[in-house]
Image: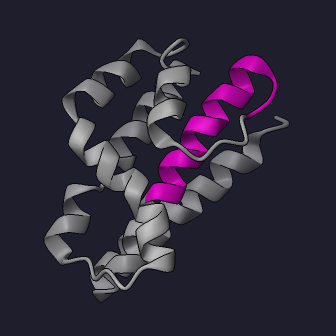
Amino acid sequence: MEYEFLKRIADNFLKNAEKLLKEGIYNLAAFNVEQAVQLYLKYLLAVKIGEFPRMRSVKRLILESSEFCEKLKEILEENINVIGEIETAYISARYYPIEYLEREVENITLQKKIREVVLKCL
């Protein structure tokens, strides 16, 4: 499949997030969570429409993806604060001296659920 590389990279970010969380490297774990979620959503859109958007907003990606996968809209509505934290992790972990705590990163590890839903919607 032409866009299979997106899923492969997302899977690697997911594995890395889990590893970093266990190692106590919470900022990079949060960043990897965001990257995994973003790429899973781009993968779904690429498969469904033949290209993937160049945007980085997880919320917007979920909203666009929900056209093909209604369950993603439910996830957004049920987890709006967590999705906001995931989206913020991209900038925070890279550019600001914000230190995440283990509990915060555990709270944003919604990527497994999003992965599962995306794969069911393909």
Location of residue 85 by image quarter: bottom left
Residue 58: give x, y in percent of width and height. Answer: 48, 41
Residue 78: give x, y in percent of width and height. Answer: 20, 29
The number of callouts visible is: 0
Q: Is residue 44 magenta?
A: yes
Location of residue 89 by image quarter: bottom left
Query: Start and end of the magenta stretch?
Result: 34-52
Q: Farthest residue to the front: give it.
A: 96
Residue 118: give x, y in percent of width and height. Answer: 50, 30
The residue shown at (70%, 47%) is: 6
Between 118 and 99, which is closer to the camera in this rendering?
Answer: 99
- 59 to 90, vertically: above or below: above
Q: Quadrant of the N terminus?
A: top right
The answer to whether 42 appears left or right of 88 in the picture is: right
Residue 90 visible somewhere in the drawing: yes
The residue shown at (26%, 36%) is: 80
The answer to whether 7 appears left or right of 81 in the picture is: right
Secondary structure predominantly adopted by residues drawn in magenta? helix
The answer to whether 9 appears left or right of 24 in the picture is: right
Q: Quadrant of the C terminus?
A: top right
Residue 31 visible somewhere in the drawing: no
Q: Farthest residue to the right: give it.
A: 2
- 48 to 42, vertically: above or below: above
- 44 to 111, vertically: above or below: above
Residue 79: give x, y in percent of width and height. Answer: 23, 36
